[in-house]
Amino acid sequence: MTPLPAAALHAINADLHCHSTVSDGWLEPEAVVLRALGNGVELLALTDHDEVGGIDAAARVAAAHGLRFVPGVEISVSFAGETIHIVGLGIDHHHPALSAGLAQVREGRDARAVRMGEALERAGIRDALAGARRFARNPALLSRAHFARHLVASGVMPDVRTVFDHYLVRGKPGFVDHQWATLEQAVGWIRAAGGIAVVAHPARYRLSAADLVRLFDRFVAAGGEAVEVVSGAHTEDEMRRFATVARQRGLLASRASDFHGEKESAVDLGRCNPLPPDLEPVWSRLL
C-alpha cells in the first residue's frame, strides 16, 4: 500500500481509546462502533480495561460497515503510588502472553471491589458493592466507575466526577490501594502481542514532575512507543505540554476521546482536537 501524504494521514478522524460494557463503558461493543460511524470516525480502537472480550464483536460490525478497526486494550499499572493506564494498539488479542497477563490483572479486581464496598459502608454508604454490581455488565470487570454510578443513582452525589473527587481517589474514604501490573509487564505483554504501547491520558495522573520524567524513562526503556497527546481528559495546555514530551522523546502521538458514554465523557467519539501537524500519528504504524 502506498503511504499516505503527511497531510492526509493527519486528516484521518482516528479515535484510538474508548470503552464498552465489557469494561466500564455504557454501550455494547457493537453500539460503540455504530456511534463512531455516525460521528464520522474513520479509524477506531476499542480499548477496554484489562479485557479484550469485546474486540471480535466490534471488529465484525466495523468490517460490515467498512470502518477501519484496531484491536486494543487498556492495562492497569501501579507506578509511584498511582494507577497508570497503558493502552495497547494493534494487538493480537488472542496472544497467550497477553491473555495470561490480563487474566492476572483481573484476578485482584473482585477482592478490591469487596474491600471498596466495606470502606464505603464505613463511610455511611450502604450496599455499595451490590449497587456497583448492578451497573457492571461484565462481572469480572467491576471498577470504580461502577461504584460511582451507583452513588449517583442513589442521589449521594450529582455526577461521577464528583463521586471520584469525594470518595474514590487516594485519601478519600472509598479508596482502596491495589497492586496492578508493573509498567514493564504491561509494555511487555503488548509488545509480545505485536502491539504498540501508549501512555494513556498522562495529564490525569497525580505525579510529581520528577515521577513523570521517571515514568517516561521507564516506559521508553521497556519499549513503549507512543503517548496520548490529544485526549478527552486533556485541556489545550495539557495537549501542548505532552506534544512537547512526544517531540523530546521521539514518541508517536495518539488521539483519543476515552469515550465511556454520552453522560460521562467530556468528548464524544471522533470529536477530539487534531494532532499538532509536526507529530507523527501512531496510526501511521497501524494502517
Image: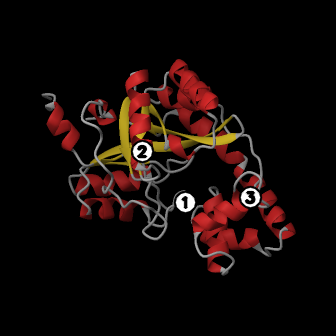
Q: Describe residue 173's horizontal placement relative to residue 192 as left or right.
A: right
- The numbered mark at residue 24 is 1
- The numbered mark at residue 113 is 3
Q: Amino acid at mark 1?
A: Asp
Q: Quadrant of the N terminus?
A: top left
Q: Describe residue 210's horizontal placement relative to residue 86 as left or right.
A: right
Q: Which residue bears the numbered disc 2?
A: 237
Q: Quadrant of the C terminus?
A: top left
Q: Amino acid at mark 3?
A: Ala
Q: Is residue 92 visible?
A: no
Q: Describe residue 94's horizontal placement relative to residue 146 as left or right.
A: left
Name which quarter of the figure residue 117 lies in.
bottom right
> In terms of depth relative to the viewer, which is nearer, 170 or 285?
170
User: Where's residue 93, x and y in %?
Assistant: 46, 40
Q: Describe residue 65's horizontal placement relative to residue 162 as left or right.
A: left
Discs 1, 2 touching: Cβ within 8 Å: no
